[in-house]
Image (tube, rainbow, N blue to C red):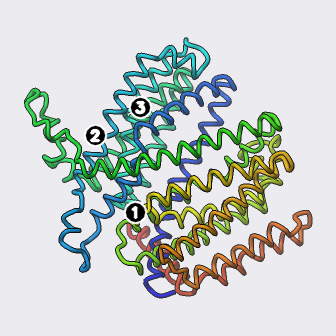
């Protein structure tokens, strides 16, 4: 690997450390909240709180219009330095960053306010529909009040990612998550279910304010004060009445078209995926019963714990970089570095999970879920291919292949659902993880073929070597028996052997130098 590739690996490593820390904090806080809620509220209260949370998630997904990918693309393109090959027309066509931010807010925030008002008006029938009891209409009101703040929080996080402010994004996540936990523990502890519902509203407010502070400090200090954005004029509203130009509250048409084109397509894929997952869960309940569905959901939940981190790494680090990449060489470098480094992160974690799967289940769930342990090996293998697929699909939107992105998403959902329902009757829960593995394997093969043949992507030898050896390692660890101590020791010993083969000396040197720099910096600050 050349020096540029090593530097990129170091950049991915730094981004991984920041996002990994924020993800671990988020997961830990979620674990504490779930345990606290279960002990304090009981099954009924926890079910009501989960319904309220799901309702807020659904409304915020709709009101944000899933414009995040489009916002990041436009901001990353506007934030990249002009290249020699760019024509004057290309530079003139770039949408100004303040117009992107203003347009995104004006598309989503008014919609969120409108939906919130309608939800308050229809609180009783909505409560009867969602909670099966109209007396919980105040829960709908609290969710509705928090909706505009939740949408604002989502958009502000997207702005930080679009400007590649990874450190600020990670810190904002950690701070807001910690403050939300404190509010939840206090309010739920004193007022039980209604305190937990109020804490949900407070959490949306705290998160939006926290992310606004980081946006203002890191990327939008001058941006949010520009007259084109209109915030400075809005601050003066009490003194100037309603005498301000309505043009400042109009979205930029070109930016709106781009954001809506990305958003509506993303929304279609997300809705399709949610619908197919609902069909699959319903099929499990119908054929096997609710208890088996609970076992399967435990396996899926376990996967989501770490897939969230890799999804964040792709969307926060890789996607903005690809949006600002302008040559095929840069594109190949970023994609190969991400494939290489994400494999280095994923495989040791997967090996640890495979070796201690029963202990992990006991810690995260309980001994009642140990029947799900045999499902984990194939689920983990499928997760590795899913991570590779996330990297390979990350380049489709930056390169303007919207139709291909939607088509691949629909193909994967259809493939996964079709194979799952076919194997469910014969292999029961085992059939679902087999289907998950096969669908992700086929999906990666199709994506790789598309990248090479259509996008002219080139897999570097280092990436091919890393992926191939990783598959060999996973295969050995999955198929070697785990009933014998010696076999387990062999599995543990295979991991350092794998590392010695896939990690270069230059990468090790750079990692050592980085650790020394951080250690020296800590000592300097302490002195």
Q: Earlier in the sequence, mark 3 or mark 2?
A: 2
Bin the neighbour count of mark 1 within 10 Å (Cα to Cα): few under 14, some 14-19, many 20 and up: few
**Residue drawn at point x = 44 percent, y = 55 percent:** 170
Q: Are marks 3 and 1 in contact (CB under 8 Å)?
A: no
Looking at the image, which is closer to me, 496 or 84? 84
Q: Which mark is residue 130?
A: none
Q: Is residue 185 visible?
A: no
**Residue drawn at point x = 11 percent, y = 28 percent:** 242
Q: Earlier in the sequence, mark 2 or mark 1?
A: 2
Residue 515 on image: x %, y %: 50, 74
Q: Secondary structure at mark 3?
A: helix
Residue 314 on image: x %, y %: 49, 61
Q: Earlier in the sequence, mark 3 or mark 1?
A: 3
Q: Identify the residue position indicated by label 2 in the image.
A: 106
Q: Identify the residue position indicated by label 3 in the image.
A: 147
Which of the two discs, 2 and 1, sits closer to the camera? 1
Which of the two discs, 3 and 2, sits closer to the camera? 2
């Amino acid at each position: 690997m050349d020096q540029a590739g090593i530097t990129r690996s170091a950049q991915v490593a730094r981004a991984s450390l920041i996002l990994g820390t924020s993800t671990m904090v988020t997961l830990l806080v979620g674990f504490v909240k779930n345990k606290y809620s279960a002990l304090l509220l009981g099954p009924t209260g926890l079910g009501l709180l989960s319904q309220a949370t799901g309702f807020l998630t659904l409304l915020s997904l709709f009101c944000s219009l899933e414009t995040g990918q489009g916002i990041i693309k436009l901001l990353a393109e506007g934030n990249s330095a002009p290249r020699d090959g760019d024509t004057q027309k290309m530079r003139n066509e770039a949408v100004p960053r303040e117009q992107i931010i203003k347009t995104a807010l004006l598309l989503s925030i008014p919609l969120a306010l409108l939906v919130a008002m309608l939800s308050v008006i229809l609180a009783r029938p909505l409560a009867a529909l969602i909670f099966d009891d109209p007396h919980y209409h105040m829960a709908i009101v609290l969710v509705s009040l928090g909706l505009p703040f939740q949408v604002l929080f989502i958009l502000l996080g997207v702005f930080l990612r679009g400007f590649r402010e990874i450190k600020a994004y990670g810190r904002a996540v950690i701070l807001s998550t910690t403050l939300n936990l404190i509010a939840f523990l206090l309010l739920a502890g004193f007022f039980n279910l209604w305190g937990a519902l109020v804490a949900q509203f407070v959490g949306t407010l705290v998160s939006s304010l926290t992310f606004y502070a980081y946006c203002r400090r890191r990327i939008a200090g001058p941006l949010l004060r520009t007259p084109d954005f209109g915030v400075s004029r809005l601050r003066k509203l009490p003194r100037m009445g309603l005498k301000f130009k309505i043009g400042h509250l109009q979205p930029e048409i070109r930016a709106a078209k781009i954001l809506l084109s990305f958003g509506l397509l993303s929304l279609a894929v997300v809705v399709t995926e949610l619908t197919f997952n609902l069909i699959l869960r319903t099929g499990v309940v119908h054929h096997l019963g609710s208890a088996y569905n609970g076992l399967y959901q435990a396996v899926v939940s376990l996967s989501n714990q770490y897939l969230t981190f890799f999804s964040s790494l792709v969307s926060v680090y890789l996607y903005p970089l690809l949006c600002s990449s302008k040559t095929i060489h840069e594109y190949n470098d970023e994609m190969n570095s991400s494939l290489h480094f994400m494999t280095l992160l994923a495989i040791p974690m997967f090996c640890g999970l495979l070796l201690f799967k029963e202990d992990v289940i006991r810690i995260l769930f309980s001994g009642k879920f140990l029947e799900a342990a045999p499902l984990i090996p194939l689920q983990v293998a499928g997760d590795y291919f899913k991570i590779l697929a996330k990297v390979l699909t990350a380049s489709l939107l930056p390169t303007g292949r919207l139709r291909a992105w939607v088509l691949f998403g629909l193909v994967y959902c259809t493939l996964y659902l079709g194979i799952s329902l076919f194997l469910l009757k014969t292999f029961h829960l085992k059939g679902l993880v087999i289907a998950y593995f096969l669908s992700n394997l086929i999906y990666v093969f199709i994506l790789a073929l598309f990248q090479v043949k259509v996008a002219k992507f080139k897999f570097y030898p280092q990436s091919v070597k890393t992926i191939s050896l990783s598959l060999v390692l996973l295969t050995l660890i999955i198929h070697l028996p785990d009933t014998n101590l010696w076999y387990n020791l062999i599995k543990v010993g295979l991991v350092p052997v794998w590392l010695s083969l896939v990690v270069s000396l230059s990468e090790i040197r750079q990692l050592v130098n980085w650790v020394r720099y951080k250690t020296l910096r800590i000592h300097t600050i302490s002195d």
